[in-house]
Amino acid sequence: MEPIEAVCLCQEYDLKAMYGAAFEEFSPWITLLRPEEIAASNRIRHALVFRPAADAFEPYPNLQLLCSIEAGVDGLLVHPGLRPEMQVVRMVNPGQANMMAGFAIYHVVG
């Protein structure tokens, strides 16, 4: 596989700290980087995102793929920085579905 560098874009969490080890173990050709670790922003074509800031995509003129870790992509589809050439996808995690179900049950019962 060709190596991929992906920037982590999130205002709230350090996505590299949260997911970096899993990517190294299961997808070693993908390197997650924090914005401050990127030497040439024009080389970045992929981003792992969770509630990115309104201007988060501006430094990356060649960004083509946004991979959301959220349960849905509605927030990204209306993001002010979304450009027509950007594809939006989301990660699917069975554990996330269980957490969402638990969250819903808590608010119905509680």
Image (cartoon, grey):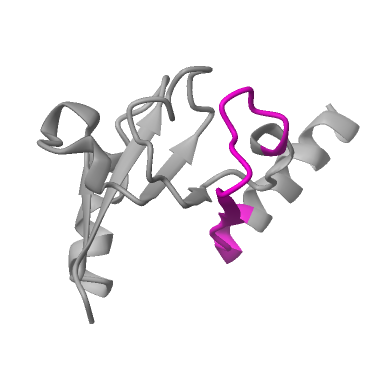
Instruction: Specify whether 45 is left or right of 103.
Output: left
Query: x, y (%) of residue 23?
Result: 26, 62
Quadrant of image for the C terminus: top right
- Residue at the image point whose x is 15% and y is 38% from the top: 40
Instruction: Specify whether 104 is left or right of 57.
Output: right
Question: Looking at the image, is 31 positioned above or below residue 13?
Answer: below
Q: Report the number of numbered marks.
A: 0
Q: Looking at the magenta stretch, what is its main secondary structure? A: loop
Quadrant of image for the N terminus: bottom left
On whether residue 86 falls in the magenta region, the answer is: yes
- Residue at the image point whose x is 46% and y is 18% from the top: 55
Question: Looking at the image, is 89 positioned above or below residue 27?
Answer: above
Query: x, y (%) of residue 100?
Result: 70, 46
Q: Quadrant of residue 17?
A: top left
Instruction: Specify whether 23 is left or right of 47.
Output: left
- Residue at the image point whose x is 64% and y is 36% from the top: 76
**Extreme-bottom residue of the structure:** 1
**Extreme-right residue of the structure:** 108
On whether residue 98 falls in the magenta region, the answer is: no
Query: x, y (%) of residue 14?
Result: 30, 31
Query: x, y (%) of residue 42?
Result: 26, 40
Instruction: Specify whether 102 is left or right of 39.
Output: right
The residues colored magenta run 77-96
